[in-house]
Amino acid sequence: MSDFRFLHAADIHLDSPLRGLTGHEGNTVERIRSATRDALDRLVTFAIEENVAFLIIAGDLYDGDWRDYNTGLFFARQMGRLNAEGIAVYLLHGNHDAARQITKRLELPSNVHVFGSSKPETFRIDSLDVALHGQSFRQRDVTDNLSLTYPEPVSDFFNIGVLHTALAGRAGHESYAPCSSDDLVNKGYNYWALGHVHQAEVVHEHPHIVFPGNLQGRHSRETGAKGASLIKVEDGQVSALAAIPFDVVRWSFVTVDLKDTASFGAALGRIRDALEAAVTDEADGRLLVFRVALKGQTEIHDQLIASADQLLVEARASALGLGNEVAWVEKVVTSTTSLADPQAQLEREDAIGELHRMLPSARGDDELLAQLESDIGELVRKLPHEVRENNDDDLLKAALDGEYAQLMTDIMPFLTARLTTQEE
């Protein structure tokens, strides 16, 4: 049996927009817009430079139907580069690019082999003694355990199963083509090339069951390095596996402790220092997009809450000041706490005291909650689907979930801060 190396990628979501980057200006806009294309270009360049035997794409190459043919043309051009170097590609479609999701198609180069969606299919590479088994999704919602119908391993070959699944379930991912690790282990294959879960994970070794993660992070919850897996096979066994980063825009979460910070300027200084340290550690030629979380008990808590818009702009200015557009701040989340005594707040003879005294009764006022449902519920239901599905704002989440008592609790710090700064 021959020794060889191959690349395993998944969840490329080609031409999918990166979320949460509105307001950015300058040359970086184009880098953001083309991030998924540039990540794929890096993957193809690496495959050529490393002379891998073949590339597997385990689902969700596309993010749904193409807006136009340019998406397909770009992919065909990249596959043509691999074809010129004799590198085969084995492509499986998942929930986002299932057969019934894609209405536009282009003829792909002869080196691209696409798994059918009606039943499992096997591709053999006789020169390497490799057999690849897989089945694409026919429609988006596949609830059957597809792995159970995959064929028996080819004797004396290195057998690879290609499957788009979250296994028995992974946080944040729909349970498509559900199966267990035992189902895959018991199949007798040597390697399982999985897709669908955007976080890289080696689920099992010998046989290897691997999620490579997505090629390019698309929003603030997809932090850290993103790329594909490079697998080395010797004597019919996986001898090495490496995660290779291909992302061009990287999302990062930075926590800044503002304990004992006495001024707005001092808080900005700590934010700037944290961003600079992260850029030094992580950038490596990429654009870093930060979500900044502020924590700690501080006397400027109310000012931070009341000046949220200014705080975000100042943080973005600090990021741009690091030079050459290497960083951007997507959002600042203020989770600091006030030095004020809660009991003293209740005893105040002003609007702030009245606000704190009325909250407990307001939370249990059915008539008030019904009125909030009528007023706020109608508004949030009119929000675009993508806003409702992809938001991570606590206040909006509470409104979307109809948790109006919780909404009143969550909004209290903002109201208190506004009243406090108005008094000052």
Image (tube, rainbow, N blue to C red):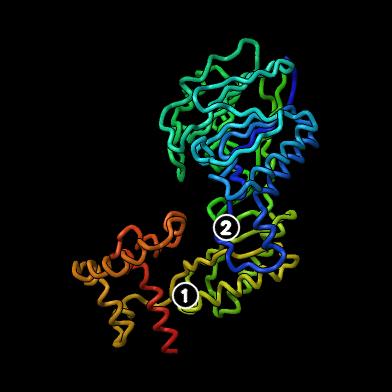
Q: Earlier in the sequence, mark 2 or mark 1?
A: 2
Residue 305 is labelled as 1
Q: Is residue 267 above or below residue 13?
A: below
Query: Which element type, helix, strand or loop, lies under badge 1?
Result: helix
Task: Pick out the residue farthest to the top.
Answer: 155
> How many numbered circles does the render carry?
2
* Residue 21 vertical placement versus 184 (above, below): below
With respect to residue 134, does 41 lie above or below? below
Whether residue 349 sits left or right of residue 87 in the image: it is left
In the image shown, does 116 or 226 lie closer to the viewer?
116
- The residue lying at 44 percent from left, 41 percent from top is 174
Say what amino acid the circle numbered 2 marks.
Answer: Phe
Three-letter amino acid code of the residue under disc 1: Ile
Q: Position of residue 139 (x, y in %)?
A: 46, 35
Q: Residues within 10 Å of mark 1 (few under 14, many from 20)?
A: many
> Residue placed farthest to the bottom in the image?
424
